[in-house]
Amino acid sequence: ELNTPVNTILSNIEMMEPETLDASHQRKIKCISIASKTISNLYDDLTYLVLSHRMISHDETIDIASLIEERLEYFSLLMESKKLHFTFSAHVKETLTIDRKKLTKLLDNLLSNAIKYNKIGGEIHFILDTHAITIRDTGIGIEEEKLSRVFERYSRFNTTVGGFGIGLNIVALIAKEYHLHVKIDSVVHQGTQVHITW
């Protein structure tokens, strides 16, 4: 009921030609696109939580660098709206045998958090290394005593931005299924680093 209209909106936005619009209309289209992608991601998260036990995994060999670049492009408008600067460094060519949708969901939730909890004009750094992905941001950070609870469902430690506290729980569920190790280090007012290894 939600997915079809949201995908219709996103598909029609993609077919538009921004260069034919004036600056005011381009800004409005960007806002519609960001809002639609936000709804789409929330829909995907809720679907995963409700139906993950019935989802059949279709594992394949994924080129991780290509997928990260794809997700950075997907979130580019959202990053642009907060004037965020991002870098992506791929030191090696890494592949992982995993369900593409699940790895996408894992990356999307981590990237979404890095954007959501970042400061205006902040930074996000993606690093791909041997058997490892690191995501660093310059956001608000998490208090040390709360780090042990970040993967609990519905845990929210900051109510100034939207969310239900389900994103990191989904990350933990996918990581557990594929034996990935996720470590989070954070300093309040300085930022957060998420390190994924396999």
Image (cartoon, helix red, strand yellow):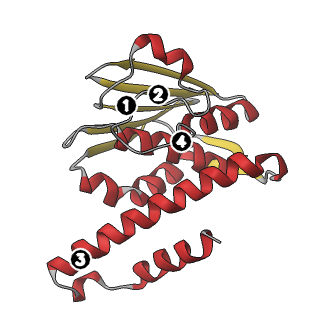
How many neighbours does mark 3 have within 10 angstroms: few (below 14), some (14-19), or many (20 or more)? some
Q: Amino acid at mark 2?
A: Val
Which mark, by number, is residue 136?
Answer: 1
Q: CA distance from mark 4 to mark 1?
A: 20 Å
* Mark 1–mark 2 CB contact (< 8 Å): yes
> Which residue, given by chain and number where applicable, does mark 2 sit on?
194
> Depth-wise, is mark 4 or mark 1 nearer the camera?
1
Q: CA distance from mark 3 to mark 4?
A: 37 Å
> Depth-wise, is mark 3 or mark 1 nearer the camera?
3
Q: What is the x, y in percent for residue 82? A: 24, 50
Q: CA distance from mark 2 to mark 4?
A: 20 Å
Mark 1 vs mark 2: which is more N-terminal? Answer: 1
At 47% from the left and 78% from the top, the residue drawn is 9
The number of numbered discs placed on residues in the rendered structure image is: 4
Mark 2 vs mark 3: which is more N-terminal? Answer: 3
Mark 3 vs mark 1: which is more N-terminal? Answer: 3
> Which residue, given by chain and number where applicable, does mark 4 sit on?
93
Q: CA distance from mark 2 to mark 3?
A: 34 Å
At 38% from the left and 35% from the top, the residue drawn is 159
